[in-house]
């Protein structure tokens, strides 16, 4: 499926901000998941490559990162973002069919992908489980989308978020997929070493509008928004951008660190 979030400049900036924040806020989870110097890592659903670049720094020159994405625009953006990074590369591939060799990675990471692939969630995690070596980890991160919002906000911005959730529901996506990460890992034959939830609370910089706004063209294409809606939403975000006191992005996040058993032949 083509990723619905348009990769504008503000979206690329948001990805970079979130990648750096993840390394800091999830430091102990990264350690448990094996995102450490020398690790061989696959970043599946790498988007524009911001996370892959941060992971490449983390694993250092003795490690290696392969970013995978099915969206050609994302692959091009990630390739540009990783230009000059000697220990990382980007390839085209689907989350449930990456083309990577089984058992070839210490860690496979999947961040904020499952919510966009309704019906394929278990197939994706099953595939990732096969990519890691025995004893390797699959690191899953996703959100609880109904909990996401900007506070304080405006009614038009809240309407946009409501339409975005409606769009996900109509596509069969699980907007609360974060709550199921441990369940998906266990069903793939993995041992869940850590399952954790928390709230992200981030001051929103001017110009940064978030995933619902980035999906606006998909909302229009699927009949969930009009040009008039876009004009109202644009005006609302412009007003928020003018506020001296910045609003906060608040949303529930979940992570699961899942280990592949050491016993050969134990995966489904």
Image (spheres, rainbow, N blue to C red):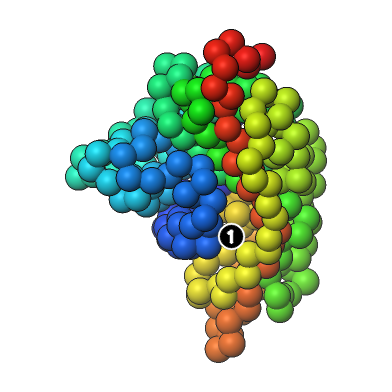
The residue shown at (71%, 29%) is 186
Number of residue marks: 1
Compared to 19, does 156 lie above or below? below
Residue 94 spot, x, y in % from top left: 52, 25
Residue 36 spot, x, y in % from top left: 38, 46
Return the residue found at the far top. Answer: 265
Secondary structure at numbered mark 1: helix
Is 80 placed left or right of 182 in the picture?
left
Which picture quadrant has residue 157?
A: bottom right
Q: Closest to the observer: 161 or 252?
A: 252
Q: Closest to the observer: 18 or 102?
A: 102
Compared to 45, does 7 lie above or below? below
Callout 1 environment at 10 Å: few (<14), some (14 to 19), or many (20+)?
some
Q: Closest to the observer: 248 or 142?
A: 142
The residue shown at (55%, 40%) is 139
Q: Dot 1 corresponds to which residue?
A: 210
The residue shown at (58%, 60%) is 210
Compared to 198, does 50 lie above or below? above
Q: Closest to the observer: 214 or 129?
A: 129
The residue shown at (31%, 50%) is 57
Q: Examine the rendering and report whether any part of residue 144 can be seen.
A: yes
Which picture quadrant has residue 34?
A: top left
Residue 65 spot, x, y in % from top left: 35, 37
Work out which quarter of the rendered image holds the N terminus and state it: top right
Compared to 250, does 4 lie above or below? above
Is 98 placed left or right of 58 in the picture?
right
Residue 35 spot, x, y in % from top left: 43, 44
Return the residue found at the far bottom. Answer: 244
Q: Examine the rendering and report whether any part of residue 231 can be seen.
A: no
Work out which quarter of the rendered image holds the C terminus and state it: top right
């Amino acid at each position: 499926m083509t990723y619905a979030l348009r990769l504008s400049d503000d979206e690329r900036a948001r990805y970079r901000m979130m990648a750096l924040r993840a390394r800091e806020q999830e430091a102990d989870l990264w350690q448990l998941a094996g995102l450490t110097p020398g690790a061989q890592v696959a970043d599946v659903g790498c988007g524009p490559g911001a996370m892959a670049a941060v992971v490449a720094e983390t694993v250092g020159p003795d490690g290696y990162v392969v970013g995978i994405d099915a969206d050609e625009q994302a692959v091009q953006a990630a390739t540009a973002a990783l230009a000059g990074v000697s220990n990382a590369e980007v390839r085209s591939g689907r989350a449930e069919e990456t083309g990577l060799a089984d058992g070839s990675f210490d860690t496979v990471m999947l961040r904020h992908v499952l919510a966009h692939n309704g019906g394929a969630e278990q197939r994706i995690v099953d595939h990732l489980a096969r990519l890691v070596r025995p004893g390797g980890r699959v690191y899953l991160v996703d959100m609880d989308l109904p909990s996401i919002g900007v506070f304080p906000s405006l009614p038009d911005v809240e309407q946009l978020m409501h339409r975005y959730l409606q769009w996900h529901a109509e596509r069969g996506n699980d907007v609360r997929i974060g709550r199921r990460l441990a369940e998906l890992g266990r069903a793939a034959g993995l041992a869940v070493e850590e399952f954790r939830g928390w709230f992200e609370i981030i001051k929103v910089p001017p110009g940064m509008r978030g995933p619902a706004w980035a999906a606006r063209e998909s909302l229009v294409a699927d009949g969930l928004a009009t040009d008039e809606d876009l004009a109202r939403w644009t005006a609302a975000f412009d007003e928020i951008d003018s506020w001296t006191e910045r609003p906060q992005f608040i949303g529930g996040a979940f992570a699961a660190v899942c280990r592949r058993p050491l016993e050969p032949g134990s995966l489904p």
